[in-house]
Amino acid sequence: MAEARRGACAVAVAAAPRRLPAAAGGAAALALLCWLAVAVAGPSAAVPGLGSGALPVDLGLRPSSALVSALLAVSVLAGGVALLTGLVAVGRGWRPRRLLLLAAAGAAVTALVPPVGSADHLSYAAYGRIAALGADPYAQAPDAFAGGADPVASAVRDPWRSTTSVYGPVVTAVHAVTSLAGGESVRATVWCWQLVLLVAWAAAAAGLHVALRGQPALRSRAHVLWTANPLLLTVGLGGAHVDVLAGAAAVGVLLLAPRYPFAAGAALGVAVGTKLPYGAVGAGVLLAWWAARRGGGPGALWLLRGVAGALVLLVPAHLWAGAHAYDQTRTASRYVSLATVWRPLVDAGVPRSVLLPGTLALMAVVAVLWWPLLVGRGAALPFTPDRWRRCAAGVTTVLALGYLLAAPYELPWYDVLLWGPLALVVPAGVAGGWLERVVAVRLTLLALAYVPGLVDGMSPAVEAVTLGYRREVGPWVAWSALLTVLALGVALRRWAAAGARAA
């Protein structure tokens, strides 16, 4: 009887992956194809013009805002379906080898066509141009540089023409290098930046593959969450956002830290020197190190090596950028985007002075509920590199989750902060499966709020739909996600406690 039951279970488990991979692969392919179709079609309400040049390639078709919005909406929805279906299939034993080939091909093509969904890459090009020519992107806005006549800096789109850089000095140095490579061509400069992001994404994917060898289930889950995540490939990599570089560097920190602390510190320097919220991975590593000391973990020399690796990048980058490098960051800390939990409150008259303490309070609540589920005893157990890495990833995931749910300014590509650490964490019981589904649905619905992406070029009808969704639906998506995560944390902790008592 026991053998018969095991055989029946094996057949059921084998049958489910045969059905689910087709759905996951088909949805992922649809997501990539729709996104790439918008990109290659050329300038539109989703794709800012890049001027003349060979790469990235577009056909100059100038599709309507309605068409590109429809294609991008299908892409986002299909990406969400692919991610959810893939996670279910992996949980039932699927190994996504063909999906990885599709993801690799899709990622490579994103570097051959223009970025989609925002004009952020034009700001990156402008700040890099200003820095490469010896000026200060933290003090001089693109519309003020060279009298507003520079061929690259003048390409920045509203509302960022008169805004100085909000990005860290390490990524600004990278932008300066890509500007030197691209010269006076906006298109060539953007393409060089896209190549940087492609290499960063691929390096993180390869690192995950190597680090999780011998653990096929965990490796498959990590690839579905990072390497073959169609929302990451489109919204993040396909949008050419700095978050991909920072997110890949954060994955590098977690992978390298147990054995190569200096290299991990350098990766942390890249992550934090790109965007400050990626300091969460530094906190995760530090807390994991502290907890691991009793279990035979690395000592103070390991920590000093890691700090040295970070300072090697951060000190010269900040000396080059100057003390005012975070002036615009401080200004931006009072911004409130439309699709956040804070938007209805600010519109109702809540003063912006409560944004920071309110965000920290919500993050603390998320941490209290999810720490036992994502971190648990962690590195306090006898030290092994894998156990230590999971603890650091768990801490980072808790911090990233709280920040993304509670931050007053949140855009879809900011979620890259979460996906890398989540790919390396091993949650307690069923907590991981439920959390993955919630954050996948949240990202899908949030990404829909930012279709087609630019503030101009939309027809009145498309503008009414997209801005209406962003203003009227987006905040309640954010609130629903926050409350669901909190309720889920309470329920899972009670379930775990009941199971422990029954045992």
Image: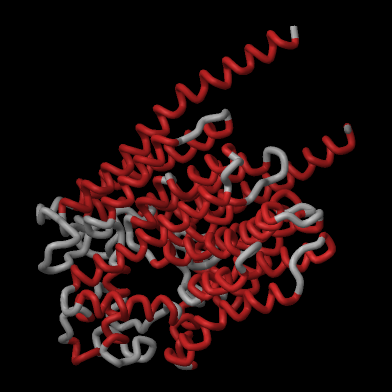
In percent of width and height, residue 266 lies at: 53, 74
Give the residue at x 27% y 59%: 115
In percent of width and height, residue 449 lies at: 38, 53
Image quadrant of residue 291? bottom right
Whether 68 is drawn above or below 16: the answer is: below
Work out which quarter of the rendered image holds the C terminus and state it. top right
Q: How is the image coloured?
A: secondary structure
Whether 370 is drawn above or below 265: the answer is: above
Residue 350 appears anywhere in the view: no
Number of callouts:
0
In percent of width and height, residue 191 lies at: 24, 65
Give the residue at x 12% y 63%: 54
In front: 45, or 180? 180
In front: 301, or 168? 301
Give the residue at x 39% y 35%: 98
In percent of width and height, residue 248 lies at: 47, 61
In front: 469, or 292? 292
Horizontal placement of 72 versus 259: left or right?
Answer: left
Work out which quarter of the rendered image holds the N terminus and state it. top right
Residue 122 appears anywhere in the view: yes
Give the residue at x 50% y 81%: 313
Horizontal placement of 483 versus 346: left or right?
Answer: right
